[in-house]
Image (tube, rainbow, N blue to C red):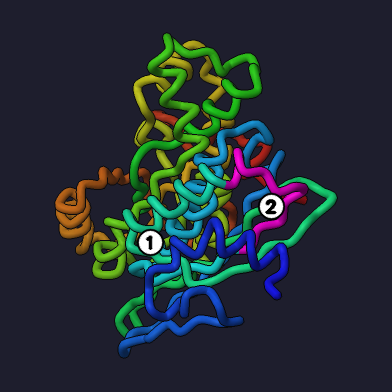
Amino acid sequence: MPSGEDDLFARYFKPLAMTPGALGLIDDAAILQAGGDDIVVTTDAVVAGVHFLPDDPPDTVARKALRVNLSDLAAKGAEPAGFVLTLALREVSESWLAPFAHALGEDATVFGCPLLGGDTVSTPGPAMISITALGRVPPGTMVRRSTARAGDVVMVSGTIGDATLGLAILKGEEGGQGDGAAAHDAMVERYRVPQPRVALARAIRDHASAAMDVSDGLMGDLAKLCSASGVSAVVEATAIPMSAAARTWLSRDPALLARLVSGGDDYEILCAVPENRRAAFAIAARAAGVPVSAIGRIIEANHAPKLVDAGNREIPLERRSYSHF
C-alpha cells in the first residue's frame, strides 16, 4: 500500500514528470541518457528564513528553488537536462503545495528541465527545498571557475544589487525605499524570482575562459573565482551595471554601494573572457537577448579583487559576500 509520502509526491509532482526517463515516478531512480555529452551536476537548497521569507508566495519559492540551480548550469555552459527534488516540510498544506507544484511545472517546461524524481520528508525545522539539477555539455567543454587568466576581461550579465534592495524592502529596512509601486515591485521580484541566464550558456561555453554565477555577492564570488584560478582582479565601480532604481537609491546614499556589491541573490553570470573573444562574446550575448557588461580586468596578483572608483582609488569593503557561517 502506498505511504502518505508516496501519495503526496504522486498527487502533486507526478504530472510534472513527463520525460520517459522519470519512469512515472514509480521507481527509486530515473534514467538520463547522456547522448554522448558530459553530464554536469549541481545542487542547491533554499531554506525558509534564509533564502526566502516564510510568508513568500509558494509559487515564487518553487521558481527560486529551480532557478538558482539553472543559474549554476548556465554558468558552466550547460543546457538543462532534468532535476530531482527533495522537500522537507513541517506540514502538508494543499493551499501551499498546489501553487508550488504548478509553478515548478511551468518553469520545468519553460526551461526544458523536466522532473526526474524526488523525495519528501517531514521536519520540525523550517521548510527546505533541495534540487539537484543536471545539464549537458559537449565532451570536455564545461566552463570552470579555475581557468581565468591575467588579461581576461571581467564581465557580468544583467544588473547587480536589485535583489539586495528587494530583500530590504520586504524587511522594511531603511534604504529599501523605492520611488513608487513599480520600482518597489521590480526589486521584490528580483529577490523572489531570479532570472537564470540559460540563454547565455552557449556563449559562455564558446567564449569564456572561466565563469560562475553571482549568488552570494559580486565581489565575494569574484574572489572565489580568482582564488580558484590563482589570480586577482580590479573592478571599476562605475562600470557595474545597475538598474535605474538602484542608481537612484545609490545617489541618495553612496555608502549603499558596498551593500549592493556584496549582497546575494543576483543570480547573474560572472565570467572572465579573453580580450580577443570579448567582441564575439558580446555579439553572442546580444543574440541571446542577455545584456552583458565589462566591469574590470583579471590581473596577476595574489590579493583579493579590488573595487576602485573613477579615480582608481580602492573602495574598502567590510565584507564581500553573504556567508551562511
- The amino acid type found where label 2 is placed reads Met
Examine the image and state in which quarter residue 86 appears.
bottom right
Asked if residue 190 lies left or right of residue 317, the reply is left
Return the x and y of residue 30 as percentages of the image width and height.
50, 81
Marks 2 and 1: in contact by CB < 8 Å?
no
Q: Is residue 212 above or below residue 293?
A: below
Task: Say few, some or many: other residues with alpha carbon within 10 Å of mark 2 (under 14 / 14 to 19 / 20 or more).
Answer: many
Query: How many numbered dots are placed on residues in this image?
Result: 2
Return the x and y of residue 180 as percentages of the image width and height.
42, 9
Question: Which one is closest to the eye, mark 1 or mark 2?
Answer: 2
Span of residues in magenta: 86-97
Of residue 146 and residue 21, the one placed in the foreground of this image is: 21
Rendered residue at 37%/67% (across/down): 80
Rendered residue at 51%/47% (across/down): 64
Of residue 315 and residue 73, the one placed in the foreground of this image is: 73
Examine the image and state in which quarter residue 19 appears.
bottom left
Rendered residue at 50%/45% (across/down): 218
- The amino acid type found where label 1 is placed reads Ala
Q: Is residue 179 above or below residue 74?
A: above
Q: CA distance from mark 1 to mark 2?
A: 23 Å
Q: Residue furthest right?
A: 124
Q: Which mark is residue 46?
A: none
Q: Which residue is mark 2?
A: 128
Return the x and y of residue 135 as percentages of the image width and height.
40, 72
The residue tagged with tag 2: helix, strand or loop?
strand
- Residue 96 part of the magenta-drawn span: yes
Return the x and y of residue 246 as percentages of the image width and height.
43, 23
Q: Is residue 29 above or below residue 314?
A: below
Q: Quadrant of the N terminus?
A: bottom right
Q: Residue furthest bottom?
A: 36
Q: Which residue is mark 1?
A: 74
Q: Is residue 61 above or below residue 167?
A: below
